[in-house]
Image: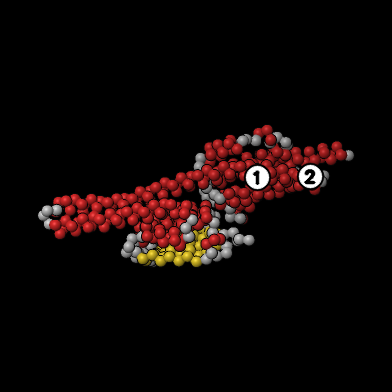
Amino acid sequence: MPEKNIMSHEQGKKAAADALDGNFDGIFEIYEKKLMDEQNLLITGDGGARELLRGQAFTLVERAASALRGEEEGGTSSLEEEIHQNTEAARMPFMEHPDESFRAGSALCAAAMEVVLEKADLSEEAPEAVVGISLTVHKSVMDHVARVVMASYVDYLLMKIGEIQVEERRHFSRDLHDHIAHSMALVKQNLELFRAMRGKDEAAAEAKLENALETSGKAIQMARDMSMDLRLSETGDPLRLALDNLVRASAPPDVEVEISVSGDEGSVPDRVRDQLYMVMREGLRNAVSHSGGESIRMEVEISDGEVMAAVEDWGDGFDTSSDSADGVGLRSMRERARLMRGSFDITSHPGDGTRAEVRVPLRKRK
């Protein structure tokens, strides 16, 4: 009697594997509908994205069928091979959040089991045997999804870090050119005029020397402010102090900047605080460089479950459907918000100013 049960269980696994192999179109139809119902980002896009999704699903269903036959373990690739295979197959870093892929993996498991229960004759199987088949399918699919997601998302994060570093260097280069280099050019010009006028017009020469000294002092202070700005993410300064220093280093004297920080900053993790600072720095730079306004407001509101940070100006504004809405600065802000699992929103109208806002969820403290 026990031997009959064992054979029945093995036959049930084989029937389930055959159902997976012979009914992929039905599985994919159910799977696709589940993704559409939950508005999963993996199903959006052009036809090419759908075909890639279909190919990935087919591979995973094949793996599940092999696992039910006891054939999978010998062919499992190493993590390094997974990384290489995924990079070669996608030819681009993973572009969706891992949550989307994990939910998609669960949807594929559910679709596969719906077809197995419909097509395979498991009426003689004990309930625990059916559960075992379901767990085998789930483990085979989700193990692979987890490995690919990990490899792809690490690749994606590294790419974003590289982009951010490049953009930071560009900003630093522009700041050096626009502020320090310009000031030092004025110092040089005043010193040359001082040398030319000395002995001919002592009053004018003295005035040029005073201008050179004053401008060099401002250049030294700007260099110190820029240095503080670069070190800011490592200092642990409160956001209010960090933003004050940022305004002093980045905002022209003729632009009024209001800063408001409210709530318990102790509930904001350091990494979130640093990224919020970077987002607001980018927002301030955009407002100063492009808005043409004379007034900017920077605000941070911290509540029990969320932190909101915004930069708002009352300048020229722009059409958010135009190419301007996809500039490097706004992309950087959007990506930083995404990496914090937050949201980014830009509101603007021509002639009516701009508001860039980030909201990041916070874990409640015990």
Quarter the C terminus occupies: bottom right
Regarding residue 239, the answer to whether it shows in the image is: yes
- Residue 166 appears left or right of 200: right
Q: Nearer the viewer, residue 141 or 155?
A: 155
- Residue 219 appears left or right of 198: right
Image coordinates of residue 315 in percent, x first then y, are 36, 64
Q: Secondary structure at mark 1?
A: helix
Image coordinates of residue 232 in percent, x first then y, are 44, 54
Real-space CA distance between mark 1 and mark 2, rounded to the nearest whole angstrom: 20 Å
Q: Secondary structure at mark 2?
A: helix
Residue 39 position (above or below residue 21): below
Q: Which residue is mark 1?
A: 142
Q: Which residue is mark 2?
A: 129
- Residue 359 appears left or right of 227: right
> Which badge, 1 or 2, comes first in the chain's sequence?
2
Image coordinates of residue 124 in percent, x first then y, are 82, 44
Comparing labels 1 and 2, the label whose residue is closer to the camera = 1
Name the quadrant containing residue 317: bottom left
